[in-house]
Image (cartoon, rainbow, N blue to C red):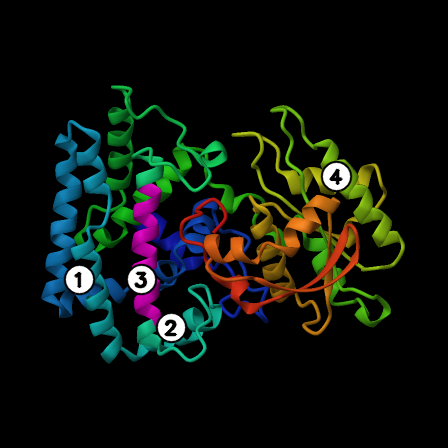
Amino acid sequence: MGNLLKAIILTLVLSCSQLTQAQDYFHDKTPQDWVIAKNYYASYILSQDSLLLTAILADDPTFQQLLTVRQQRYTASAGCKELACMLHAFKWSNAEIDALTAAFLRRLAKDKKLTALLQEKLMPSHTYGVSTGMTIAAYFEKALRQDCKAMNDVIDVYAGGVKPNYPAIDSISFNTRDPRYLTLLQDVRQDVRTDVKRTDRAFYVTLLSAVRLLEINERWDAAQLEPLISQENKAAYEAIAQTNFANYPYSLLLTLGAGPEVYDQPISPGGMLRSRMAARSYFEGLAPFIIVSGGRVHPYKTPYIEALEMKKYLMNVLHVPEKAILIDPHARHTTTNLRNTARIMLQYGFPKDKFAIINSSVSHINAVEKMAPRCMRELGYVPYELGKRVSEVIVEFKPKIESLTIDPDEPLDP
């Protein structure tokens, strides 16, 4: 796994202190790095210490035995003749998750360098829920268990064909009953094996299997257009620091998308109309920035990213300047339109004491006002605070720190 591990170690993804250091990113990060860090942040930051696994192996025979058995099971899957055998080889078992977590916690209890790494990067990230009031050990255990389960869930969906939360837009790309399919999974296994030949690298077997399955299913959506700050959002990001927000009633205008229903349609009629709403509000001076939110969602396997197409429409048709437009090209639902916008507001330096606004159709804003129970069901928290209804098509909102939490069962937009 040498070259891959070096790439992971040498690159840094989302701001480790996400509330204040949105500029903390590298340009040379690969799409795979983005997918790993966004979905499995704790596992990602562990990989930054190249000597950590070697030290644990040398000092902890139980951990060494765990990885040895893990490696042997993955190697033996070359003889698998059915799908269930391959899935068993790819995934962490519950007993392995327990043993792995225990080994890392033993190490944490006596390793000041690991404690410092987690204190500096994991705890302030709030990526596994708000960390305030939690010990490093408790938060670390929660993160490790979540990562392992999330990897297993990806394997179930994108190798095993289990239905995801939204089958119509997120399902596997292959017929798992096709006799040729097992050969494809063997090719995945062989590819991963080239990166995990050593016993200490067996820690990455399930992670790399999950990431490789996302890749062959064309589901690296979490990485698309990253890094936003230095590319699509660069002009607006730089303008934020120069903006006197006191001159505007609101800090930002979030425009909700409306996914096309036709496969080769870049932007839907609803997307055009909502873009016009946003441009009108911008030119009236309601807010200095617009954010358009929507990923590569509708219809299934569309080649178009909704937010990018709305940005083009705002610029080319409605003449909104690029420096006033931010995009969130990852959201797949209204819940994550708001969550991802909240993340951007916290990371990009928007004023914390000022409301932003959401605009969309009347029915869509009606739904937003009643969306908190859906957020609790799907995300486990509400990532925003709503204010008053400004008009039929506009409602106020503020971001909440809970929005930084990873959604472990939505790997395309965690």
Q: Nearer the viewer, mark 4 or mark 1?
A: 1
Which mark is first along the chain, 3 or 2?
A: 2
Which mark is first along the chain, 2 or 1?
A: 1
Say the numbered circle drawn on residue 312: 4
Q: Nearer the viewer, mark 1 or mark 2?
A: 1
Which mark is first along the chain, 1 or 4?
A: 1
Looking at the picture, which amino acid does disc 3 mark?
Answer: Leu
Alpha carbons under labels 1 and 3: distance apart: 11 Å
Which mark is first along the chain, 3 or 4?
A: 3
Reading the image, the residue beneath label 1 is 99
Reading the image, the residue beneath label 3 is 144
Looking at the picture, which amino acid does disc 4 mark?
Answer: Lys
Along the horizontal axis of the image, is 107 left or right of 229?
left
Q: Which structural element holds mark 1?
A: helix
Q: Which structural element holds mark 3?
A: helix
The reply to whether dot 1 and dot 2 touch (C-beta < 8 Å) is no
Q: Nearer the viewer, mark 4 or mark 3?
A: 3
Reading the image, the residue beneath label 2 is 117
Which mark is first along the chain, 4 or 2?
A: 2
Which mark is first along the chain, 3 or 1?
A: 1
The reply to whether dot 2 and dot 3 touch (C-beta < 8 Å) is no
x, y (%) of residue 120? Answer: 43, 74
